[in-house]
Amino acid sequence: MREKVIAIHSSRGGTGKTTIATNLAVTYAREGLNIALLDLDFRAPSLFGAFSKGIQKPVKRWLNDFLLDRCTLEQALIDVSEDYGLEGKLLIGLANPAIEAIRNMMGRSRAWEVAAAKKLFSIRTSIFNDMHMDCCIFDTSPGIQYSSINGVVSSDVTVVVTTLDSLDVEGVKNMLVEFYDEFEKKSVILMNKAFPQTRMWSDNERNGLITKMEKDFKRPVIGVIPCYCDVLEATRDSLLVVENPDHPFLKDLQEVAMKLELM
């Protein structure tokens, strides 16, 4: 894989954005790639819960501390490679889920947000040159918050995750026009929970849906993943790629991973 930063974004919560980001990161690390996964959703942090089974020691430094100049990026990263038996290295940077920490980040000024964006741009040197990572994945906050804008703008490519819910579709359309087009950022669409797993879609139906969505979004659709009931019911600390590596969800995600590698 050519060194790249991938942002996982959505117009609103509930699309499965974090499930995509976490399992994508572990999928790459299982293949032997060195991956950094950073939680940029400071309003509703979720990576701490997702990796709680693999975090063996109390977290001393958060990504909040890095952005607040309290530590280096390397000090804010946790290596969970051995905990999950991964071939490659997986370093995770966690947003602090404590209520007070969330309030602190939400109350930051616009000038601070601009400075934070510069720090995100600067991590490329640390991630790729110093730590020798192959890829960095940002799990951004949904919508157009400063943290998500910073993540998208400092990425090489953004995967916009959407369902077929009309609010999601309209939200993504508006976000692409009002934000992505303005910054001319490279982006692709991942349609998640697209149809019930119990419904058998023909290739013609699936291809027809992709054609329609690409026309509506004016972006390539990188994947279409059905709605799997057990994925919806899974607990926050469940990593499918570790606990159920043969799950069809992961086969769909593997295709997405391969396409992203080639971009």
Image: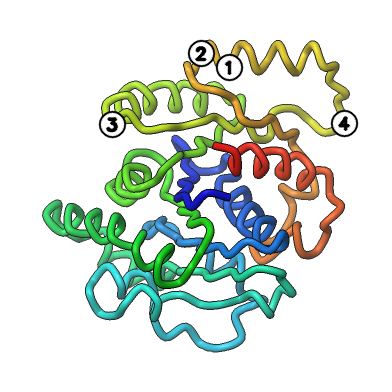
| Numbered badge on residue 198 | 4
Q: Quadrant of residue 202?
A: top right
- Closer-to-camera residue (132/77): 132
Considering only order in the chain, which callout, 3 or 2, is on the residue closer to the N terminus? 3
In the rendered image, which residue does mark 3 sit on? 183
Foreground label between 4 and 1: 1
Relative side of 238 to 37, left or right: right
Picture quadrant where residue 152 is located: top left
Name the one closer to the observer, 191 or 108. 191
Q: Which residue is mark 1?
A: 213
Front label number (3 vs 4):
3
Mark closest to the chain's N terminus, 4 or 2: 4
Earlier in the chain: of badge 1 and badge 3, it is 3
State yes or no: discs 2 and 1 in contact (Cβ < 8 Å).
yes
Q: Is residue 233 above or below residue 94?
A: above
Residue 216: give its label: 2
Give whichever of discs 4 and 1 has the lower sequence position: 4
